[in-house]
Every structure is written in C-alpha cells, then in structure tokens.
Amino acid sequence: MRLEGEVGAFGHFLLSAAYVFALLVSTQAAKLRKLPFALSWWALSFPIAALSIASFGYAHAAESGAHRLIGAGLLALLIAVVALLIFRTARAMRAGKICVPE
C-alpha cells in the first residue's frame, strides 16, 4: 500500500500471498512441537506480528471488516505464541538449558 499510495491490486496480492504462506507454515506446527526449545523460536513471532499489522493496515485502508477480523485473530494468535515463548524461555532458564557455553 505504501508503494502505490493507495489500496491497489498489488497490495492485495501481497497480503493474500502472505496469508497463503502463513497457512503453509502452520501445517508444520505439529513438527515444531517435537523439536527441543531454543531461543531461535522467538523468530516465529515476528512473521505473525508483521501479518497482523499488515492485516490491520489493509483493513483500515480498504475499510474491510473481514481483514479486521483476520488481523484480530492473528493478534490473538500472536499473544498466545508470545505467552508460550515466555513460558518456555523461563522454563529453559530455570533448567539451565539456555545461555550456557557450548
């Protein structure tokens, strides 16, 4: 939207492609749960935050209630993911499994 200065087909395409990629990545959630926790897991929260912000931005610019709902859902997911990451990080710190010399 910032490239075109308005809500256009290109911005809509990019946001739609981001939704498709997010759905593809979400199919890997079961495999991710089996992996041991590492601080790099925090990187999972950044794309969710970016997609939430993009959804709200598009909803505002296009006056789209559907995108506002998608953004709210993604924001709720982001809050849950960050809460889980805080919990897992605290648990790993107590167990002495992170921030240790290799």
Image (cartoon, rainbow, N blue to C red):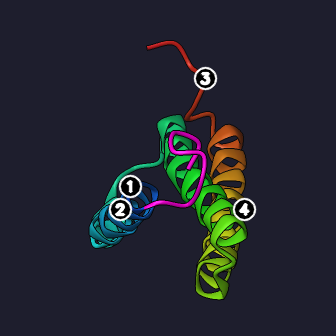
The reply to whether the C-beta atoms of the residues labelled 2 and 1 are less than 8 Å apart is yes
In the rendered image, which residue does mark 3 sit on? 99
Q: CA distance from mark 2 to mark 1?
A: 5 Å
Q: Residue at the spot x=28%, y=73% of the render? A: 27
Classified by dominant secondary structure, the portion drawn in magenta counts as loop
Tell whether label 4 touches label 1 (CB within 8 Å): no
Q: Which residue is mark 2?
A: 13
Q: Provide the residue span drawn in magenta.
A: 1-8
Q: Nearer the viewer, residue 28 or 18?
A: 18
**Mark 3 or mark 1: which is in front?**
1
Q: Earlier in the sequence, mark 3 or mark 1?
A: 1
Where 49 falls versus 66 (above or below)?
above
The CA distance from mark 4 to mark 3 is: 20 Å
- Kindly check if marks 3 and 1 are in contact, taking CB atoms under 8 A apart as contact: no
Q: Earlier in the sequence, mark 1 or mark 4?
A: 1
Name the residue type under label 4: Ala
Q: Amino acid at mark 1?
A: Phe
- Check disc 4: other Cα within 10 Å, few if <14, some if 14-19, many if 20+: few
* Residue labelled with disc 4: 83
Left or right of 13? Residue 72 is: right
Q: Amino acid at mark 2?
A: Phe
Q: The residue tagged with tag 2: helix, strand or loop? A: helix
Q: Earlier in the sequence, mark 4 or mark 3?
A: 4
Camera-side residue: 72 or 17? 17
Where residue 49 sits: x, y (%)? Answer: 62, 54
